[in-house]
Image (cartoon, rainbow, N blue to C red):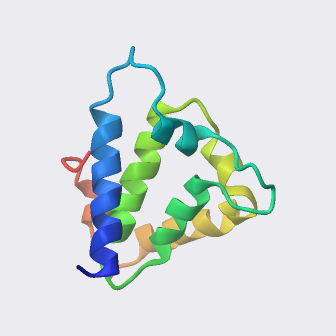
């Protein structure tokens, strides 16, 4: 299995786990890891790592799955995605804007709502 496929599969599984999570269930260790700040200030937040996959151009499904996972994290956890992105927030915003405005962009990035 190729590394891109493994990452796509893990994003998809994590998105489904968060989607099917009961609202009254206690926080699992994975959920705690996703919502907690890194212990070391020098390391980046897992949200920022997921957001870096929007730069990926070889497989159009990977940026779409990263975007859907970020959306799910924002819906499930009461945290600021902007704060988690840190100094990369402006660059990531610019990438989203340029990709949405591009004529060559895959339209399913912002029109296909059946993937959530």
Q: Residue furthest top?
A: 24
Q: In the image, residue 96 lies at what x, y percent?
A: 50, 65
For the N terminus, the image quarter is bottom left
Q: Quadrant of residue 67?
A: bottom left
Q: Residue furthest right?
A: 41
Q: In the image, residue 57 lies at what x, y percent?
A: 39, 82
Going 54% across and 69% down the picture, which residue do you hit?
Answer: 52
For residue 105, above or below residue 108: below
Going 43% across and 78% down the picture, which residue do you hit?
Answer: 56
Q: Residue furthest left?
A: 114
Q: Residue furthest bottom?
A: 58
Going 65% across and 69% down the picture, which residue do you hit?
Answer: 91
Q: Nearer the viewer, residue 101 or 55?
A: 55
Q: Quadrant of residue 9?
A: bottom left
For the C terminus, the image quarter is top left
Q: Nearer the viewer, residue 34 or 77?
A: 34
């Amino acid at each position: 299995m190729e590394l891109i496929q493994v990452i796509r599969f893990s994003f998809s599984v994590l998105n489904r786990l968060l989607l099917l999570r009961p609202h009254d269930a206690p926080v699992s260790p994975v959920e705690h890891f996703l919502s907690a700040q890194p212990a070391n200030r020098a390391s980046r937040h897992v949200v920022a790592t997921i957001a870096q996959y929007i730069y990926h151009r070889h497989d159009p499904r990977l940026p779409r799955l990263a975007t859907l996972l970020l959306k799910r994290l924002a819906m499930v956890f009461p945290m600021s995605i902007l704060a988690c992105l840190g100094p990369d927030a402006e660059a990531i915003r610019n990438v989203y804007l340029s990709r949405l405005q591009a004529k060559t962009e895959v339209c399913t990035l912002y029109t296909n709502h059946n993937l959530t």
